[in-house]
Amino acid sequence: MHDMDAADFVAARTELRLSQSAMAVALGVDQGTISRWESGKVRIPAAIQLALETLKENVQLMPGERRILVSDPIAPEGIEMLRRVAEVDVKLGLEPDELLKIIPKYKALVVRSETKVTRPIIEAAPGLEVVGRAGVGVDNIDLDAATERGVVVVNAPQGNTVAAAEHTMALLLSLARHIPQADASMRAGKWARKDYVGVEVRGKTLGVVGLGPIGSEVARRGASMEMEVLAVDPFVPDERARAIGAEPVTLDELIEQSDFISVHVPLTPSTRGMIGSEEFARMKDGVRILNVARGGIIDEAALAEAVKSGKVAGAAVDVFTEEPIKPANPLLGNPRIILTPHLGASTAEAQERVAIHVAEQIVDIFSGKPARYAVNAPMLAPEAMLVVGPYMGIGESLGVIATQLLRGRLTSIEIDYYGEIADHDVQPLRAAVIRGLLRPISEENVNLVNANHIAHSRGWRIEERLQSSHETFTNLIELRVHTTEAEVSVAGTVHHAGQPNIVAINGLDVDFLVSPHSYLLVCDNDDRPGMIGAIGTLLGTLDINISHMQVGRREPRGRALMLLGVDEHPTEEQIEQIEAIDGIYNVRMLRF
């Protein structure tokens, strides 16, 4: 193989039909490097020549053999990459019946958030192999229908990370220096320098709530600006947080010590309204608040009142409970609240990146390779599915329970597999456990393809053990999650009816079946006469119906674990009333 020169490189790029920017993304370099290689001023590494050969090998399909429909606007670089492997039709603004009529002739469909990929659409396309979402959220795609039909759904969860982090920092500096307000004042013909005295961010404390991809990038940027960065994320080990320049703390500590607070968590039942009037009251006077995550995490009315009262010096909000924002939104009208119309991912680079990330995965799937960000789980081999498949549900349930019982910050994870399942590939079970651990607190979609990548990106250490038998159960999965404060253990098997069956929590024997969309109260209490009656009476007073109940204990009149299935979701105030009963140490509400 001779050394590649500039002319060879240009010829290869022309053959692949890629622009310089698309070629840069495909090779993992910047566009300036491509320009230098093509100018002949810089030697082209031998590794790049090999990478180009691999790219050419992936382009073995004639364009006429497969067709791809792009039904929402995406960056032209993504379309250009797709045209290497198929004919691409760009048809925007299709009505549902129009899409239904033309979808049967396509092998792939690329959308953003506008097109709704419903079950009828998927079922009308017998040859559909992949749906690509150029972005993160996939709530406009029927994942169940896609999985049933063997259609892979891919997205681009990392494409907008830098854009959202940079927008956060832009808003942070705008808050610190009153930039939008000063600009508006100038345009009104004023020269009011004394009205816009700002603060330096150097030496200030930045509190980052959530250390996912975007929160981590915000923490890094805060540290680079010589801010003291505090972070709370119970599912990121302390050493991982410190490696990106953040000191791990509790949410209470972050709220009380921060000068700037930026939230970067998904909107879930546990994060909705997580910062409200009570939290604002405990913050420093003059704190500044940012939300470039999801509307509803911060109570908008409480934030507006906190800014009006002067408790909060200013706020910057990019996301809202209702979008587009309504005229009655309480955040409107206060000049100390900076508002932007959901611009977190709105950069040319981010739009190009998500388009290319999705296009790359479609090319991989057409070439028989796994997609990096497959949202729905791939099908298992029939012989493996027969044994392992029924236990994926219990694996996910164990993770869901453990996450909701955790106290402190995660340090390590252990999974034990007992019985016949241990004789097979347990990677699908591991993926199911990781999916369950993340489900209550993250929007990340976890499957066999990306489970290890996601666990590694969060700094999780997972130890697995295979045991050929168990003294009681034919097959069993036991999960232990260690934190800075305690250990949570949950074990389960599969009921003869196929439902996930939880058989132990924190070493105490229990026996209950997991039902979707159900609620379970977990009470740590003294085992003594009257406890069941006291809780039952209170729940009756609160009009909360009990569907089932049991107690796990090690010995009579010791500590016990009372599990109560309830039909209604108790409020936080009602849970506090239950905890106030003498002999009850704490109560957790589990959602399935």
Image (spheres, helix red, strand yellow):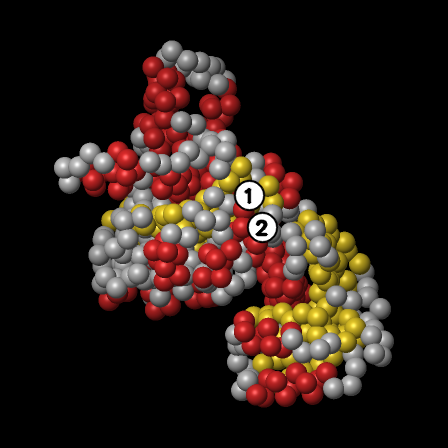
Residue 113 place in picture, x, y as percent = 32, 56
Residue 443 place in picture, x, y as percent = 48, 56
Q: Residue at x 36, y 48 (%)?
A: 314
Q: Residue at x 63, y 77 (%)?
A: 578
Does residue 243 sit above or below 4 in this rendering? below
Q: Quadrant of the C terminus?
A: bottom right
**Mark 1 residue type:** Leu
Q: Is residue 90 left or right of residue 400?
A: left
* Residue topped by disc 2: 253
* Residue topped by disc 1: 230
Q: What is the C-alpha distance between the residues marked 2 and 1?
A: 9 Å
Q: Residue at x 51, y 23 (%)?
A: 47
Circle 1: element type = strand
Q: Nearer the viewer, residue 232 or 578?
A: 578
Outermost front residue: 194
**Mark 2 residue type:** Glu
